[in-house]
Amino acid sequence: MTDATYERGVQIRQEIFGKELTDAHLANADDFNRLIQDLITRYCFGEVWGRELLSRKVRSMLTLAMLAALGRDNEIKIHVRGALANGVTKEEIGEVFLHSAIYAGVPAGVSGFRCASEVFAEGTSAGAGATS
């Protein structure tokens, strides 16, 4: 029996973060971290990212703003790559972090800009280093 929600989650992760990286994360899951990989795949991507009311581009921008507000720098970098893959422009990413600075505090916005700048300097749009 296949789990359609899980399979949809795998597909969405592959489209956002790259097939090679997604497949490696799932294949390298062990007895300990398989639980979180399954949760991320099934619920984060299969259930929520798989909904159609908001586009992936909008979801990426929302995710970046929330990660900045929470100070999750590593995840910001991962999701900047994903946002680029979802069609968010470099300029739009800047606007997201500028807006975050107003509502979540200047340090949150500064951190977002710094993380995004590091990703832009790598010259990658998706995949490298993504875990979620």
Image (tube, helix red, strand yellow):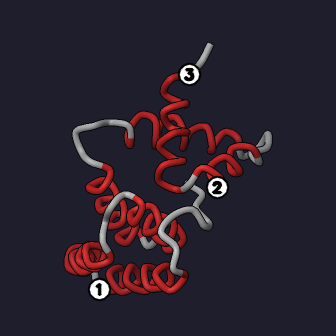
Tag 1 secondary structure: helix
Q: Earlier in the sequence, mark 3 or mark 1?
A: 3
Q: Nearer the viewer, residue 63 or 57?
A: 57
Name which residue lies at 51% across and 39% down.
11
Q: Looking at the figure, which quarter contains the C terminus?
A: bottom right
Tell me which residue sits at (57%, 62%) in the image. 127
Q: Which residue is mark 2?
A: 21
From the viewer's perspective, is residue 104 above or below residue 48? Answer: below
Label 1, residues with CA under 10 Å away: few <14, some 14-19, many ≥20:
some
Residue 35 place in picture, x, y as percent: 66, 39
The image quadrant of residue 93 is bottom left
Determine crowd level at label 3: few under 14, some 14-19, many 20+ residues with C-alpha closer than 10 A: few
In the displayed structure, 103 sits above or below 9; it is below
Q: CA distance from mark 2 to mark 1?
A: 33 Å
For marks 3 and 1, give the CA distance.
Answer: 43 Å
Q: Provide the residue designation for mark 1.
A: 106
Q: In the image, 106: left or right of 4?
A: left
Q: Nearer the viewer, mark 2 or mark 3?
A: 2
Q: Is residue 84 left or right of residue 105?
A: right
For label 3, the residue is 3
Q: Position of residue 43 (x, y in %)?
A: 47, 36
Could you say where residue 33 lies in the image, as x and y percent from the top left?
71, 46
Q: Residue 82 at what x, y percent from top left?
A: 45, 61
Mark 3 or 1: in front is 3
